[in-house]
Image: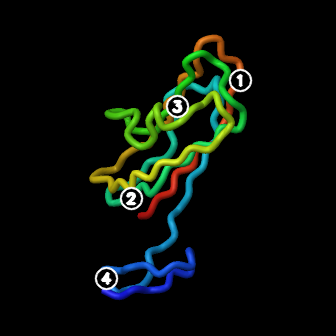
Amino acid sequence: MPWVFNPFTGNLDWTASGTGPTPAPTSYAARFAWGDATPVDLIPLAAGTILVDVQVSITIPFDGLGAALSVGQPSDHNQFLSTSENKPGVQAEFTTAPAYEFASDTLIKLYITPGAGANAGEGIVILNYRQ
C-alpha cells in the first residue's frame, strides 16, 4: 500500500489498491432563495458514492425570524448539514465533511425555512462527491 502523488491536490495520498491517487471529487452546485418550494431536490447519488463535503454559501442573508437551512434526505433532514451548522441570517460560508458512503441510491435534498416575515435570502449549495 504505497504513498502516491495526487496531481489534483498536490499532496501525497495513501492508496490501498496501489493503482494510483484518489480522483478529485465531482461537484454539484445549485442556487436557492427564500421563496423556493421546499424541499429542493438537489441530486440523486448512487449506491457506493461518497459524499465528501457539503458547502453552503449565503450570498444574501435571510431576513426572516427563525430562518433555517439543512441538507439531508427524507428520513433525516439534518444528516449532511444540520440547522445548527449554519446561520442563514449571516452572509458567510458553512462546510461539513460527512464522508458518507451511500448503501443505496439516495436523492439529496435542501430544506429551507425562510422564517417569519421573510422577503430576502439567497445562497448556493455545493456537494462534492466521489463515485
Q: Residue, x 38% and y 79% (percent of image)?
A: 14
Instruction: Name the residue tied to disc 1.
Output: 120
Q: Earlier in the sequence, mark 4 or mark 2?
A: 4
Mark sitting on residue 17: 4
Residue density around tag 2, few if under 14, some if 14–19, many if 20 or more, within 10 Å: some
- In the image, what residue type sits under mark 2? Ile
**Figure quadrant of the N terminus:** bottom left
| Circle count | 4
Instruction: Name the residue tied to disc 2.
Output: 50
Instruction: Name the residue tied to disc 3.
Output: 69
Q: Closest to the observer: 1 or 44?
A: 1
Q: Are marks 4 and 1 in contact (CB under 8 Å)?
A: no
Residue furthest to the top = 117
Residue furthest to the left = 103
Q: Earlier in the sequence, mark 1 or mark 3?
A: 3
- In the image, what residue type sits under mark 1? Ala
